[in-house]
Image (cartoon, rainbow, N blue to C red):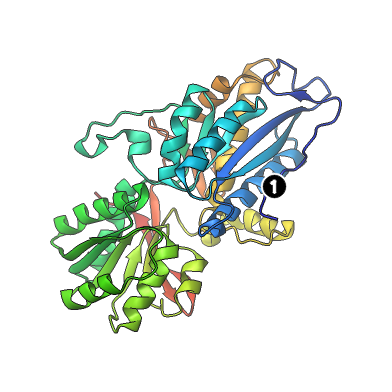
Amino acid sequence: MIGALSLSACGSRGEKKSGDGGSANSGSATTVVIGVDAPLTGDLSALGLGIRNSVDLAVKKANETNEVPGVKFEIKALDDTAKPAPGQQNATQLVGDSKVLGVVGPLNSSVAQSMQQIFDDANLVEVSPANTGVALSQGEKWASGDKKRPFKSYFRTATTDAVQGPFAAQFLYNDAKKTKVFLIDDQKTYGAGLAATFKGEFTKLGGSLAGEEHVNPDDRDFSAIVTKVKSSGAEAVYYGGEYPAAGPLSLQLKEAGVNIPLMGGDGIQSGDFIKLNPKSQGDYATAVGLPVETLDTAKKFIADYKAAGYKDAYETYGGYSYDSAWAIIQGVKQAVKDNNGKVPDRKAVRDAVQKASFDGVTGKVSFDEFGDTTNKQLTVYTVKDSKWAVEKSGTFNG
């Protein structure tokens, strides 16, 4: 059930492989595959399965509406288990399949780092619905103002930690009135980067750090850190990382009598965080974009997702995954048009995605010169009555 979800393993006899120069309008369907890389098993599978299903929904919709005449889309979903090595292997496998003209994913910024060069060497466009590590699109020296795009094939529909971390800092300091925070991260690309951008803005505002600690993503016993937080006088904890560790950390803090909110980024804004932590009431999380449920543009996506009967929720990145897939579909559509009705090569699709602009599930979808989304809106959620509830939406004012 959690293997790769494919609309069709084999094409009809009349189908042509993509990239063979066949006409998309010749009467026989040309198969174009959109790859998906995400954690389909393991601790982060709730998010990964939502990504896969949402891409599947976009592909089904494109086929139903004949979005690209003469082209039949399929998906090829691979499991990276949220780890760089499998992600790298998946990238090689997707590049090796000539029918793959675009890839949605991955979830994790650390996994993306292992895949980018492979995709870029093959001019295979990659659109992540979830990566927030800034260096992925703006280079390692972005923080000093020296921004250089490392890979032309890399795009994302999620906004970056350059705005997510500071947005959280402004909320905790200005809205929640917390001036002393204990900072913890899981040392991964995403978590450490998010914590660093939070710290920069929080201290700039006048806040102070009660302490700083690092954990491992697989840690589940946080007794030593709980003791430190308890004696630090912290008014809140900010955690850079994901829900499998954040849930138990918050629970152990509460059970030790440290009744202060834990806040994190989109990596903890999952229903599974609440399942892992029955005492999560009052905890906070930021997530990219506006809440999908409140957007008129998302009503059809939500209804269609429900009607499709997926057993897994679309989760935090569902709308962004659909939009990532649709950006690739629109890229193929434009590239076919520019190529006299023939399915083009990967480079043409990559270049067409750069120019893509459409009204998506999450709002206006387009990309800047770095391949980053032009949508910089974010939302703060808080746990109320065992559910994530919207606390505040807006854009980071930096």
Left or right, 142 with reference to 339: left
Tell me what residue is drawn at x 64 percent, y 61 percent. Answer: 312
Q: Nearer the viewer, residue 121 or 325?
A: 121
Tell me what residue is drawn at x 22 percent, y 70 percent. Answer: 178
Quadrant where the N terminus sits is: bottom right
Indicate whether 267 appears above or below 226: above
Numbered marks: total:
1
Say what secondary structure mark 1 lies in: loop
Q: Nearer the viewer, residue 218 or 350?
A: 218
| Location of residue 79 in the rendering, given as x and y in whole percent from the top left corner | 58, 46
Read off the residue under disc 1: 5
- Report which quarter residue 268 is drawn in: bottom left
Tell me what residue is drawn at x 41 percent, y 38 percent. Answer: 113
Q: Nearer the viewer, residue 299 or 213?
A: 213
Q: Nearer the viewer, residue 321 or 390?
A: 321
Q: Amino acid at mark 1?
A: Leu
| Location of residue 150 in the rendering, given as x and y in whole percent from the top left corner | 36, 28
The reply to whether residue 391 is in sight is: no
Question: Looking at the image, which residue sits at the far right?
Answer: 13
- Report which quarter residue 134 is drawn in: top left
The reply to whether residue 93 is in sight is: yes
Tell me what residue is drawn at x 65 percent, y 21 percent. Answer: 337
Q: How would you rate the neighbour count of disc 1 (Cα within 10 Å): few for under 14, some for 14-19, many for 20 or more? A: some
| Location of residue 42 in the rendering, given as x and y in whole percent from the top left corner | 54, 57
| Location of residue 389 in the rendering, given as x and y in whole percent from the top left corner | 46, 70
Indicate whether 321 appears above or below 299: above
